[in-house]
Amino acid sequence: MPPVEATAHGKSAIDRVRIAELIDREQAKLADRTPTSRQRYERGVKVMPGGVPSSFQENDPWPVYLERGEGARVWDVDGHEYVDFHNGFGVMCIGHANPTVGAAVKARIDMGTHFAAPTDGSIAVAEELADRFGLPQWRFTNAGTESTMDAVHLARGATGRDVILKIEGSYHGHHDAVMVSVYPDLEDLGDRDDPRSVPYGAGYPLALTELTRAVPFNDAEALASVLGKLEGQVAGLIMEPAMMNINIIPPVDGYLERVRELTREHGVMLIFDEVKTGATIARGGATARFGVQPDLVTLAKATCGGYPGGAVGMTDELAEQISEGRVHQYGTFNGNPLVMAAAEATLTQVLTEDAYRTLESSNSWLLSACDDIIERYELPCYSEGLGAKGCVIFAAEPIREYRDYLTKVDGELSTLAWLYHMNNGVFMTPGVEEEWTLSIAHTEADLQRFVDALEAFARDVTSS
Ligand SMILES: Cc1ncc(COP(=O)(O)O)c(C=O)c1O
């Protein structure tokens, strides 16, 4: 079995030898439990790199292949049932096989599934999103990557400038402008107020990489300094208002307000990438929750209830860039009737204000149950949550930005916790950086299963 990849190591009083033994034991257990996944992997790897359709689905020694899902549960190809906290990378807030969304999609199937001509569904969804996010104009896409790509084009087209700012350690999809300083090594980062542009993998021309600069999260002064140095060159700042790809890092008080002021002062378009937060942490996403209005909002994931769609919201002025033909926003499948039927049912019938209240209270219950275990076993970690999303962060003190994530998060403990989840019927994303996403189908008994797995982990790592 290959060694566990730890993206980061923190220092704690935990016995490292014991952790290594437990990781070996739990990895062997997971491998023994999933022989059919292994067979699928051996078949899949002959025709797909890593045996998976997207590299984010890879895992050592093989991924767990799933067969079906219903409500808060999923079943793997070996017949194991799990409570799903992965939820399709934060998409399935409505629960698997949701009957309301299923009925809307089935009705649409019988009326034809694709025309590449506008249908009523796209108008209804755009109206709903305008109401939720306070931005008047919307266009549709097929994924988060397309949403952030279109937002970058709009910022550049409207300002006539080329440079894009992003936040260190943030992921915004896999197009050239944002595959920069995603998960760079500490030694490659450079100074706080003059960070280097580090390409995330091969295939991105250096000339394009250099047009994107990264700044640290939760540091308005570093942003002010970079904006001062690049005066007149920056088209847009793209950011998650709460970071959700290095666990969860909420904005500190006043940070987003100051970012809004600075971007206005410098004529820079502010893009809130709400692909993760948009339909999960409040009816109007982070924009409503934190009360700061950006120029552009990008959506995907939970917005379309498990169907492949996204959206980009914009001001009237930015919309003119498109309607007057200066910025081109295209896509054969944009506003696809099937996806729109799913999105309309999701947003207007399932993820209502009441549903957000339910998600919030389920999450508070789970977070405080985790806190209780952390306290009782004196674990070097803490919990963080917003709306449907939460995590236990294996760092002894709260992290505020990517540089903290690299230096303070304990990769081995995070990996071991994941193995305990998977071996105890809790389906979670592999890796150190993700969080759980709850659905409206999760019951208290479902949440208890997560707590029990965490407690089994806590007992074993702290017993000598
Ligand atoms: C914040 C954020 N933006 C954009 C994307 C890209 O979305 P997609 O995978 O749908 O292209 C992701 C994907 O995880 C994301 O987390």
Image (cartoon, rainbow, N blue to C red):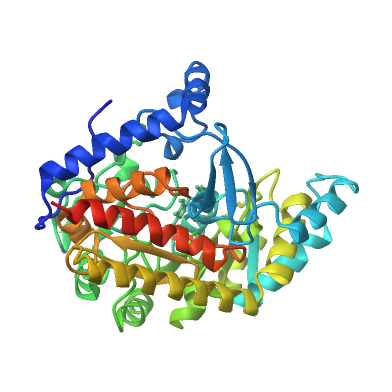
| Residue located farthest toward the front when viewing the structure as drawn | 464
| Residue located farthest toward the right when viewing the structure as drawn | 111
- Against 198, residue 44 (above or below) is above
Q: Position of residue 172 (x, y in %)?
A: 42, 53
Q: Quadrant of residue 423?
A: top left
| Residue located farthest toward the top when viewing the structure as drawn | 46
Q: Is residue 382 visible?
A: yes
- The residue closer to the viewer here, 134 or 45, is 45
- The residue closer to the viewer here, 95 or 349, is 95
Quarter that holds the N terminus: top left
Taking the spot 12% from the left edge, 54% from the top edge, the residue there is: 14
Q: Position of residue 9 (x, y in %)?
A: 16, 49
Taking the spot 22% from the left edge, 57% from the top edge, the residue there is: 405
Q: Is residue 135 visible?
A: no
Q: Is residue 78 left or right of residue 161?
A: right
Taking the spot 47% from the left edge, 25% from the top edge, the residue there is: 35
- The residue closer to the viewer here, 114 or 48, is 48
Q: Position of residue 82 (x, y in %)?
A: 52, 47
- The residue closer to the viewer here, 154 or 399, is 399
Q: Quadrant of residue 269?
A: bottom left
- Against 461, residue 46 (above or below) is above
Count the marks.
Answer: 0
Q: Is residue 428 left or right of residue 120?
A: left
- Against 412, residue 404 (above or below) is below
Q: Is residue 294 left or right of residue 118?
A: left
Q: Position of residue 106 (x, y in %)?
A: 83, 50
Q: Is residue 265 left or right of residue 86?
A: left
